[in-house]
Image (cartoon, rainbow, N blue to C red):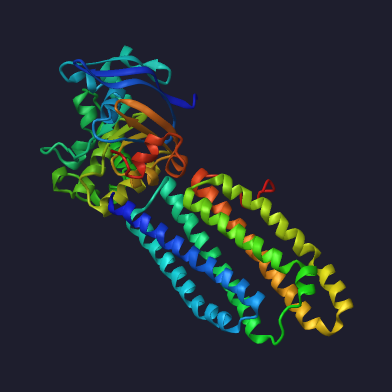
């Protein structure tokens, strides 16, 4: 293996580690939300610094590889894709942190009825599945899995579109729970963004492997 | 005027029994810079030397197929006429060591027995050196020997000498491989200017140079033309896996 190939492989491993860390942040956030676990939420805030550290390290590694090796063709596409994937993963990390902060700040757990009516937990599970799919697609270099992510994003969008109505209906029935309902709405908006970020990542994987630009295309 | 200036049809070149250029078909457009790249021994320099019939000067070398310049087979032309129309610049700067800068530029006319007035000669020297981006640097020392110039200046003098004959095509065989990065950069800038008046075909081992200077790139491997496409396409998304392996340094 040449030095260049070694550096590309090390970068790939670094990105995968960041992916796994953010995946762990997401699942912990879900656990903290379901169990109203403030300690776990605080742990998420601490680990967010590691996510940021990965982002800076990956950016710097890409910059160095560009400067030293002037990559072309699939290597160039890989690095361009990694830069954008890195940024999207970091934002998903930020979303996990945002939800964790809410858990720390609030005093009452979501009621079962609120979770059910807004479908917030269902949405959370699905957004983690989407994020997992992007990882599998990257790891296996499988664009079919990346394309399946687009379909799953439609599911999240659908829940997001019905969120206003669901929350309004819940508030009418439970006016004392208005704060919880608004928090649920805010979390739904954040989860919808995880769907968008995962879709962006899937687009970058397809760009890297197939040299096709799907960004801003209506097909996906 | 036809857009295609050079066209090869089923073109083959040999050294004795060694088949070094295999059935090449390519159409090269006028006023473009074409980079020819490939690993050592792939036939790229041999192909270049076939275009202006230098290949046949080597003992045991031969070729077949068609090599057309503006639709006319160069192998049915007088070789001297071919080389007037298709100039060449070599890897190492090779100004005539005993001639002045001035005489180097007009050497092609003198060697071909073309007589000119002093003012015509002066015009050709100034125009050629200006086109080669060398006039400002040497206009006060035209009668010094060409070998007094730096490597980069000598190579630009060789380009001036080649374009003084007003060829239609200029072949460049790794013209910057013996030069430092600053001289290389000035030659690369010059190539961009020259394509307004000439078609340039450059053999280079430097892939970044091919990417920087050329409009189209041809990739040769084991005597075959594997891929010929727009340079931007070749360096971002080549069609052939062999091209991709070569440009990404994964060639075994």
- Quarter of the image where one finds residue B46: top left
The answer, for residue B34, to whether it is visible in the render is no
Q: Is residue A189 left or right of residue B71?
A: right
Could you say where residue B162 lies in the image, as x and y percent from the top left?
27, 34
| Relative depth, front residue between B235 and A202 | A202
Say if A123 sits above or below B124 in the image: below
Q: Is residue A24 left or right of residue B75?
A: right
**Looking at the image, which residue is at 52% across and 46% down?**
A142
Say if B25 sits above or below B147 in the image: above
- Quarter of the image where one finds residue B7: top left
Could you say where residue A57 lies in the image, as x and y percent from the top left?
41, 68
Could you say where residue A8 lies in the image, as x and y percent from the top left?
37, 55
**Looking at the image, which residue is at 47% across and 68% down?**
A55
| Relative depth, front residue between A195 and A210 | A195
| Relative depth, front residue between B187 and B103 | B187
The answer, for residue B78, to whether it is visible in the render is yes
Could you say where residue B174 lies in the image, as x and y percent from the top left?
26, 39
**Looking at the image, which residue is at 23% across and 52% down?**
B180
Say if B87 sits above or below A55 in the image: above
**Looking at the image, which residue is at 27% across and 54% down?**
B182
- Quarter of the image where one finds residue B34: top left
Q: Is residue B112 left or right of residue A102?
A: left
């Amino acid at each position: 293996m040449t030095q260049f190939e070694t550096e590309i492989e090390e970068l790939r491993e670094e990105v995968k580690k960041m992916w796994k860390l953010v995946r762990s942040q997401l699942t912990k956030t879900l656990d903290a939300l379901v169990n109203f676990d403030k300690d776990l939420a605080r742990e998420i805030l601490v680990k967010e610094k590691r996510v940021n550290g990965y982002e800076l390290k990956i950016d710097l590694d890409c910059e160095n590889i560009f400067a030293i090796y002037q990559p072309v063709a699939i290597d160039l596409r890989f690095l361009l894709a990694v830069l954008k994937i890195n940024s999207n993963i970091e934002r998903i990390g930020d979303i996990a942190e945002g939800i964790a902060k809410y858990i720390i700040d609030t005093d009452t757990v979501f009621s079962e009825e609120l979770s059910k009516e807004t479908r917030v937990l269902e949405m959370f599970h699905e957004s983690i599945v989407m994020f997992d799919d992007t990882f599998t697609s990257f790891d296996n270099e499988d664009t079919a899995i990346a394309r399946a992510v687009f379909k799953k994003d439609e599911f999240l969008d659908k829940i997001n579109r019905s969120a206003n109505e669901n929350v309004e209906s819940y508030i009418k029935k439970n006016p004392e729970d208005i704060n919880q309902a608004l928090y649920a709405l805010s979390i739904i908006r954040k989860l919808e963004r995880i769907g968008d970020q995962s879709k962006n990542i899937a687009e970058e994987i397809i760009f890297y492997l197939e040299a096709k630009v799907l960004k801003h295309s209506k097909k996906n | 005027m036809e857009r295609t200036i050079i066209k090869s049809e089923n073109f083959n070149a040999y050294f004795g029994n060694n088949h070094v250029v295999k059935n090449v078909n390519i159409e090269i457009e006028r006023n473009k810079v074409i980079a020819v790249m490939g690993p050592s021994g792939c036939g790229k320099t041999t192909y270049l030397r076939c275009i202006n019939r230098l290949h046949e000067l080597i003992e045991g070398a031969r070729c077949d197929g068609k090599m057309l310049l503006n639709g006319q087979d160069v192998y049915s032309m007088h070789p001297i006429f071919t080389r007037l129309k298709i100039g060449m610049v070599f890897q190492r700067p090779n100004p005539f060591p005993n001639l002045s800068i001035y005489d180097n530029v007009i050497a092609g006319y003198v060697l071909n027995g073309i007589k000119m007035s002093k003012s015509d000669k002066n015009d050709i020297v100034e125009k050629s050196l200006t086109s080669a981006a060398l006039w400002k640097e040497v206009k006060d020392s035209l009668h010094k020997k060409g070998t007094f110039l730096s490597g980069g200046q000598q190579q630009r003098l060789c380009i001036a000498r080649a374009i003084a004959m007003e060829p239609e095509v200029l072949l460049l065989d790794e013209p910057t491989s013996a030069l430092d990065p600053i001289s290389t950069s000035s030659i690369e800038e010059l190539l961009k200017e020259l394509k307004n008046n000439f078609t340039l075909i450059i053999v280079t081992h430097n892939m970044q140079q091919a990417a920087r200077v050329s409009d189209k790139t041809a990739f040769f491997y084991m005597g075959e033309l594997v891929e010929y496409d727009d340079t931007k396409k070749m360096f971002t998304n080549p069609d052939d896996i062999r091209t991709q392996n070569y440009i990404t340094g994964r060639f075994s």
